Amino acid sequence: MPPETELFERVCGALRGIASRGDGVAFSGGVDSSLVASAARECGLEPVLVTVGFAGSRDMRFAPHIARMMNLKHCARVIGAGDVMRQSGRVDSIVGECTMSWRENCIAFALLSEFGASLGLGRIVTANGIDELFCGYNAYRTIEQEEHAILAMMRDKLDNEAAMMRAVNDMTAEYGITIAQPLLTDTFVEYAMGVPLEQKITGAGDLLRKHLVRSTAEQFGVPSKSAYSRKKALQYGTGIHAALVAGRGPADRAADRVNDSR
């Protein structure tokens, strides 16, 4: 079986084990969320793609365009600085002390869930796990390009992602929304860990990475404009990071840098 076909079937299988017809898909228009959206359609789940972001942000410009190209239902909500700071206060009370990255993701998914609840959704599916498992992060280029080092980083990032998504679900429970991560299930992780590294990253000079994910996405209905777009993390694509930094004082930002370095 071609590796692209196997990856797509594995994504479909992971979705069938978790998702239901009419669930939301957290959608930025990037390769990861577009691949999950394509697989959800293949499974007959009739997904609703949901996006939040500041007016003019990358996600609010890119996601509707890609959704139209894929002919999938898409709903978007413009957020503001007040929404970000309100949810940041909830992070303090629900999650407690955490890194800046955790805070930003908790805020983003809380806002997605608040929007999803207004649409009548009960679950939002994410593509979380692809960057960890397929060397999507730039950090994979900056370490020793040896299999043992890359796999060790992969395990550390998977542990962090699983813990962060538990915190995210604590944040979203109030809205009656479950954030589902089919690509962090044991079966999918076991498969992905066994994918040859050369299908993920080619070396320290590899700025694109996730090569198997990208070729799979393009082969199974994702526009090449999305399949080969450079990574833009959720907090940056939505504008949440910029708003949060602008709304926090120097002491807060210094504390965030310390926490993120741990």
Image: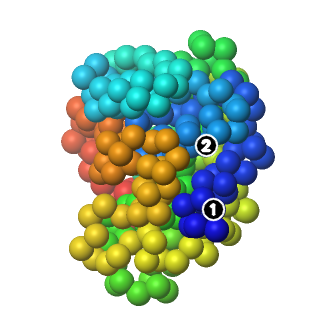
- For label 2, the residue is 39
Label at residue 6? 1
In x, y percent, where is residue 257?
A: 30, 54
Q: Which of the 4 image quarters holds residue 245?
A: top left
Mark 1 touches mark 2? (CB < 8 Å): no
Label 2 is placed on what type of residue? Answer: Ala
Check the image and tell me how it is coloured. Answer: rainbow
Residue found 60% across the figure and 59% down from its top: 5
Q: Residue furthest right?
A: 17
Please state if 21 lies on the left or on the right of 216 as rendered.
Answer: right
Query: Does residue 68 appear left or right of residue 193 in this picture?
Result: left
In the visual, does 83 lie left or right of 26? left
Q: Picture quarter containing residue 162?
A: bottom right
Residue shown at 35% from the left, 76% from the top: 202
Instruction: Tally the marks.
Output: 2
* Residue plotted at (33% across, 51% down): 228
Figure check: 145 above or below 109: below
The quadrant the N terminus occupies is bottom right
Q: Mark 1: which amino acid? A: Glu
For residue 2, above or below residue 54:
below
Residue 194 picture location, percent across and down:
61, 75
**Which of the pair 173/24 is nearer the observer?**
24
- Between 181 and 8, the one nearer to me in the picture: 8
Q: Give the left or right position of residue 31, taking residue 116 as reference.
A: left
Specify whether residue 255 is in view.
Answer: no
Examine the rendering and report whether any part of residue 249 can be seen.
Answer: yes
Name above or below for residue 124 compared with residue 14: above
Q: Secondary structure at mark 1?
A: helix
> Which residue is at 49% across, 21% downward?
74
Q: Of helix, strand and loop, which one carries label 2?
A: helix
Query: In the drawing, what numbered circle is on residue 110?
Result: none
